[in-house]
Image (cartoon, grey):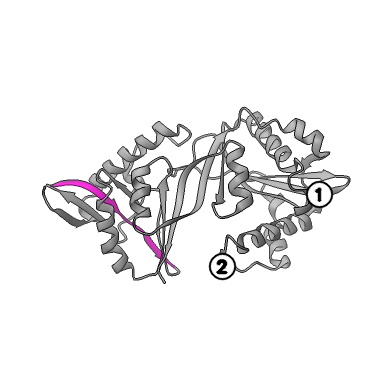
Amino acid sequence: MASLEIHPLSELRDEAARLLGERFARQRAAEPLLPEIDDFHAHVPADEGGLVATRGGQAVAYLVGTVSDGNAVVGFGGHAASEPEALRDLYGVLAERWAVSRFTVAVPASDTELIDVWFRLAFGCQFMWGVRETAGGVDGAEHRREAGVEIRGSTPDDLETAAEFDEILWQLQTRPPSFSGATVPSRAELREEWSDLWDDSDLFTHFVAERDGRIVGHTLLYRRPQGDLRVPEHNIDLAQAVTVSDARSSGVGLALTEHVLRWANAHGFNSITADWRSVNLLSSRFWPRRGFRPQYYRLYRAVP
């Protein structure tokens, strides 16, 4: 077998685009709710010192990432391979050049060979991006009756509640087993962040669930920009969903999910995306049970 040779990405961008196109074709065969892409050159990231591996003159893998705040990030289009094992060689070279101790890589959820390569480089699953059709629902009407909730669009009078729910989510992300290491913003900071929500109705739609005059849950929809390797056409994003602790397992989350699915479908959105930390016990169980299928895993490695 010919030996593996490593080249700068700038010399073989066409070959990298070819490899990415082949990878993405396999992804779409497994998950049709991915965007239709014609030009893969635009999705191979800017050089940033990326590398291409060849064997016998044929490109078999490429890898490129960006370094920010001590973390090397390989995005949706940051790697592809016809010979996945070659990615381990490329990572070995680039990890030394990046000179950081934390690494994240977005890997197609359907590509078990690529996942295996990164697992054998000591990466673990941290985060998931998922999608489902808006049609079909989750039988939330029944759960809404059982939960005794009314769902309505929010108003600026709900600002304090939105900030409170965001704080709950931050706290869940920092506690075990998530261990995100993030600092929970103050309530004042969260209130400021949410204060202009109702000025951006072209981007955001916010619903709250009330029970006996008390808001017990909310969900935020976001018209996420298209154009990457994840978001399909006619899609809306479920950006946040929170239920207060004493109302969990009572049907509130199901009722809200059913509501946003029906609303999205009625407004011409064929699919809905969501993301969650795989180490968040609540969300990592709730969303797959509601029909969300993983599109990508974010794998993470921290070197002591």
Q: Pick the residue in front: 167 or 127.
A: 127
Helix, strand or loop at mark 1: strand
Mark toward the viewer: 1 or 2: 2
Point out residue 25 in the picture as x, y percentages from the top left corner: 35, 35
Amino acid on which the number 2 mark rests in the picture: Gly
The numbered disc on residue 215 is: 1
Assess disc 1: are there few (<14), some (14-19) or many (≥20) residues with their C-alpha within 10 Å of its C-alpha: some
Q: Is residue 35 above or below residue 114?
A: above
**Residue drawn at 82 percent across, 44 percent down:** 210
| Count of numbered labels shown in the rendering | 2
| Image quarter hosting the C terminus | bottom left
In this picture, residue 223 sits left or right of residue 252: left
Q: Is residue 135 above or below residue 151?
A: above
Is residue 245 covered in magenta? no
Point out residue 229 in the picture as x, y percentages from the top left corner: 42, 43
Main structural element of the magenta stretch: helix, strand or loop? strand
Q: Which residues are magenta?
A: 57-68
Q: Is residue 38 above or below residue 78?
A: above
Is residue 66 covered in magenta? yes
**Residue drawn at 45 percent across, 45 percent down:** 296
Amino acid on which the number 1 mark rests in the picture: Ile
Point out residue 68 in the picture as x, y percentages from the top left corner: 43, 66
Q: Pick the residue in front: 277 or 217.
A: 277
Look at the image and tell me whether residue 222 can be seen. Answer: no
Helix, strand or loop at mark 2: loop
- N-terminal of the two: label 1 or label 2? 2
Q: Which residue is mark 2?
A: 181
Q: CA distance from mark 1 to mark 2?
A: 29 Å
In this picture, residue 70 sits left or right of residue 161: left
